[in-house]
Image (spheres, rainbow, N blue to C red):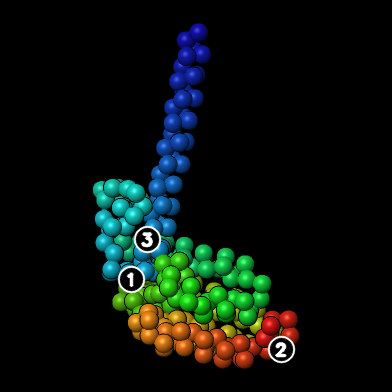
Amino acid sequence: MMSIIIGSRRCQEVEAMRIGREKVRENRERVVTAASELFRTHGFEGVAVPELMKAAGLTHGGFYNHFASKEALAREALESAWAAMAQERGRARDLPQLLRGYLSEAARNAPGKACPAAALAGDVRRQSPSVRATFAEGLDSMIDSIEAALGDDGRRAQAVGLVARMVGAVMLSRAVPDDHPLATELLEANLKAALEELPDGPVGRN
């Protein structure tokens, strides 16, 4: 009888530990998700740790239970943002559809949920080398995916130019007042030019 009671208690302890680990992982993911959106919206220095934790629904004091520093969180938040954008690219039917989504007013007006390149390119240069390296890895992956979508080998230079056009257009559009005609003109003109640069064929100007 005693062995049954001890065994039951042990099972309860193991289950409590499992639930505890899952809760810690869930809380960490909540912070990364909140930081990924807030950093893209306000910049790395535009959001303090208490604000990040509040957005995640957690207390400020618990931050260092999950991350060694804000810099460590910035790296993970960037990785999360790039991963989300890779999924978005994967859902696009073709490159023209991807371009229309990227160079849209909806994406322009929602930096926290859109591409980290356009949201953070002007800010990341002031961050640590490790954060900049994480940014560069994500950007390189984006270029690779555009190159693959272009179809033929040897289109790296075209992919780099296309990504620079996409990112630059969104950055400039966001820099001017929302109600200024230039905000829309920058997106529309660059979308038209980008589509015209695409090769003919299944990934081309559909």
Q: Amino acid at mark 2?
A: Asp
What is the x, y in percent for residue 127? Answer: 32, 73
Q: Amino acid at mark 3?
A: Ala
Q: Is residue 7 left or right of residue 68?
A: right
What is the x, y in percent for residue 102? Answer: 53, 76
User: Which label number is shown at residue 8?
Assistant: none
Residue 172 visible, this orientation: no
Circles 3 and 2: CB atoms closer than 8 Å: no
Q: Earlier in the sequence, mark 3 or mark 1?
A: 3
Task: Say which of 72 and 170 sits in front.
Answer: 170
Q: How far, Cα to Cα, is label 2 from label 1?
A: 39 Å
Tell me the crowding category of disc 1: few under 14, some 14 to 19, or many 20 or more residues within 10 angstroms, Cα based: some
Q: How far, Cα to Cα, is label 3 from label 2?
A: 40 Å
Q: Which residue is mark 3?
A: 35
Q: Which residue is at a point 43% across and 73% down the rendered structure image?
A: 109
Tell me the crowding category of disc 3: few under 14, some 14 to 19, or many 20 or more residues within 10 angstroms, Cα based: many
Task: Say which of 164 and 15 sits in front.
Answer: 164
Q: Which residue is mark 1?
A: 43
